Amino acid sequence: MNMRLMQTKMLSRGIRNCVIAVALLAAAGAQAFSLIGPLTSWQVVGLAYGFGEDIGGPMYRDEGFRWNVPVITYGFDKSFIDYFGPNGVKAIDEAFLYFNDLPRVTQMSTNLEEYSTSTLRENFSAGAMSIIDVKSTAMSLIMEELGFADPIRYTFTLRSRSVVGTPPVTNYATIMRNFDPVTWTESRYVNGKLYSYQIQEFRLPDHADALEFVSLGEDDRQTIPVASGLARITLDGSVSDSGAAGSTAPGLFRIGLTRDDVGGIRWLYRPSNFAMETLLPTITAGFALGARGAWIPFTGLTNDVTVTNGQVIGTNQFVSQGWRGGRNHMRFQRAFFDPIFGQTFVTLTNAYTDVTVTTNRTLVVQALQRAINGPDFLFLSEDLGLVQNLVPALLRRTGTAGWINNDAINGADETALSAGPGVIAPPVQISFSKLLPYFLNFTSAFLDDFPGEGDAAFSGVWGSFDGSTNAPIIYPVGGPLTLQQLRQQILRGER
């Protein structure tokens, strides 16, 4: 075996064994998070993976994908600004503010007691008028694009489904992909609520799923984490297994990230969470550490060169592949349109210090820079097509196909049954449908009349609202319906 690969595997196993040892010493918790990454070979439709708008599947705790740059930019396409206007832009700003307000993960308490398990609220007036909150919806999609899956959906999930014997019977293997951010072990709790599961079979398409549920009749909507979207828990306690992109619920809104959301961020982005990573291809050598050189080794020779394995490394080179911890804190920065042309983005250059351990165990501190020619997160408003050739899709976001999979350099999984750890690569596009409101009519052989607006189902509209007495804002700007017209429809029963 190649000596460098052997060293990489040994260091990988050593780090992971330390993680497991610490986990076994910790006390049991009542919180959890799930990670998302590209679908693996066993995550197939027959086991309820890769459905509809799914962008990936649940990862094991050491397979997470994350951003490894300190500043992440976001901005708005002209289509978003035209549809949502200044209030819609403000709603997205407020969504990112919850993430910017987080402290460094090393400054969080051990049990995360400073964060609430209950951040979901309901505006009954907005709910009656079928208004969907833009800010809260964006928060869920941002969590997903930071590397987090729906922790309720993947508290229990199928690993296998096999038909054996005569007469045939179906057997299932169910695993857990939900992890406690304090003990780092698998957990059946989400924000303090205990979940169990029941396997169900479906025919269109043919698949099975381990569907989670909570205690009978218990209304736990407020404890649903941001990473789970705005899904409602039904009266019998079962939970919709739709992902964050499909979990929009009129009248519900967020007042912050939940404890489990923050716990997931702490796990994935903590400095002690080491993984062998490569840098984004747009990163180059910088000059943050001194005027004469691009990088300096931790022990230091000069600002211009260092010696690694007896070879001189020049000032225009840097280490891309190495062991890196999480960034500890992320900052989201808005990227603005060019003030003259109003179409292109102003290029930003982010200079920062990178700390890495090379494959031969040399600790390196290097100055890097990233030229940002467009926003890492771009928000749009588009016609997103139809779902099952019937109703307009409400949301779309960039999938995991472009994420950098570093499984092969992290003690390679030779069976190829896992993905990651890896690095999330920009750009990310998040699109809101511009077809709201729409009206849905069904026909039947038993109906004598042709359908019309009077018997149509109303889709609802995008909006912004909170828990105050302020009237909700509805979109699009200058659209076909005013707030007064929405109220009139409610009174006439036309939605």
Image (cartoon, rainbow, N blue to C red):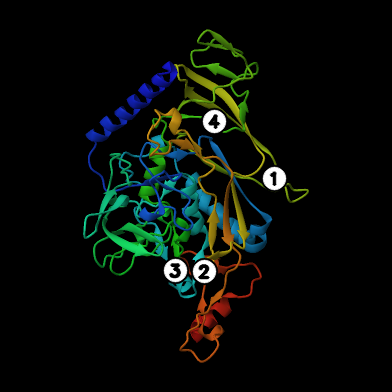
Q: Earlier in the sequence, mark 3 or mark 2?
A: 3
* Image vertical order of residue 205 relative to residue 145, above or below: below
At horizontal 57% and vertical 33% (from top left) the residue drawn is 280
Image quarter hosting the N terminus = top left
The disc label shown at residue 123, or none: 3
Mark 4 → mark 2, Cα distance in angstroms: 46 Å
Task: Name the residue beneath numbered marker 1.
Answer: 345
Mark 2 → mark 1, Cα distance in angstroms: 34 Å
Camera-side mark, 4 or 2: 4
The x, y position of residue 274, in whole percent, is 41, 29
Q: Secondary structure at mark 2?
A: loop
Camera-side mark, 3 or 1: 1
- In the image, what residue type sits under mark 4? Leu
Task: Name the residue beneath numbered marker 2.
Answer: 470
The disc label shown at residue 279, or none: 4
- In the image, what residue type sits under mark 1? Phe
The x, y position of residue 301, in whole percent, is 54, 9
Q: Nearer the viewer, residue 269 or 114?
A: 269
At horizontal 38% and vertical 51% (from top left) the residue drawn is 258
Mark 3 → mark 4, Cα distance in angstroms: 44 Å
Q: Secondary structure at mark 4?
A: loop
- In the image, what residue type sits under mark 3? Asn
Q: Nearer the viewer, residue 388 or 156?
A: 388
